[in-house]
Image (cartoon, rainbow, N blue to C red):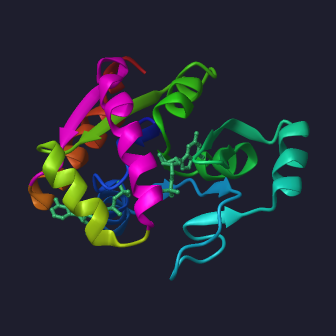
Amino acid sequence: MKRSLFVISGPSGVGKGTLVNRLLQEDDSLALSVSCTTRAPREGEKDGREYFFLTKEEFSKRIGEDGFLEWDEHFGNCYGTPKEFVLRQLESKSVILEIDVKGALQVKNSGFEHTVLIMIVPPDPETLMNRLSQRGSETEAELEKRLERVRFELSQNHLYDYTVVNDDLEEATRALQNIILKETFRGDKHD
Ligand code: ADP
Ligand code: 5GP
C-alpha cells in the first residue's frame, strides 16, 4: 500500500471542494492539506479548516523560510502548500492537495515518489458558470476574473494523470474513489 499525494485541480466552481469533502468523509486513510492564503475568509470559512489565513507579511516570511512545497498568486492573493504540514500528514495517511495547475505541476516535479494529478472538469461551460454564481461567494468582478482563468485551467488537462467529469456528484465521487484505490495498491506485489 502506497502513501500518495493526490493533487486535485480544476476551475473555480467545478465542485472540487464538494468532492474532496465526500472523499474525506468516506475514507479515513486520507488527509487534506490545508493551504495558506492571504485572501480574506469567506463567510463560514474557519482558520485552519479551509485555509490558514495569513497576512502578506506572514506569507512572505514563510517563503523566505522555504516553508512552502509550492506557492502562487491568484486574483491578487497568495496561496501556498505548507511543507511541514503535508510531510507530517504523510507519515500516516495519503494526502489530498486541492491546488491550481501551476502548483500541481510544481508538486509533481518536487521529488515526491508518488504524486497523482487529477483534473476535475465540468460537463459543459454553462454548468460551470451556473455553479460558480450559485455559490454566491464572489462579486461580479471577481466572477469575471475567475471565468477568464477557466479556459487556461482546462487547457492543461493533458498534463494530468486522470480527468474526472463532475456531472453527477455520486458518479464523480465513485470515479475519484476508484482512482485512489487503484493508485494506492498499484505495483504492490513488486514492493
Ligand atoms: P470548487 O471547490 O471547485 O470551487 P465547489 O465545491 O465550491 O467548487 O462547488 C461549487 C458549487 O457547485 C457549489 O454550490 C456545489 O454545491 C455545487 N456542485 C458541486 N458539484 C456539483 C454537482 N455534481 N452537481 C450539482 N452541483 C454541484
Ligand atoms: P479560492 O480563493 O477560490 O479558494 O481559490 C482560488 C484558487 O487558488 C483556486 O484555483 C485554488 O485551486 C488555488 N489554490 C488554493 N490553494 C492553493 C495552494 O496551496 N497553492 C496554489 N498554487 N493554488 C492554490
Instruction: Give the magenta part as a residue range.
Output: 138-167
Residue 156's spot in the image, x, y percent? Answer: 36, 23
Is 151 contained in the magenta span? yes
Q: Is residue 14 above or below residue 101?
A: below
How far across and down, in percent of the image, does residue 147 sit?
35, 45
Which quadrant holds the C terminus?
top left
x, y percent for residue 70? 66, 34
Residue sitting at x 12%, y 43%: 124
State the image coordinates of residue 11 (x, y, percent, origin top left): 35, 44
> In the rendered image, is residue 174 in sight?
no
Name which quarter of the figure residue 190 lies in: top left
- Residue depicted at 24% across the width and 48% down the height: 177
Decide whether the magenta segment is chiefly helix, strand or loop: helix
Quarter of the image with the N terminus in it: top left
Q: Residue at point 61% right, 63% down?
A: 51
Image point (11%, 44%), residue name: 123
- Was residue 134 drawn as part of the magenta stretch in this picture? no
Which is more toward the observer, 147 or 98? 147
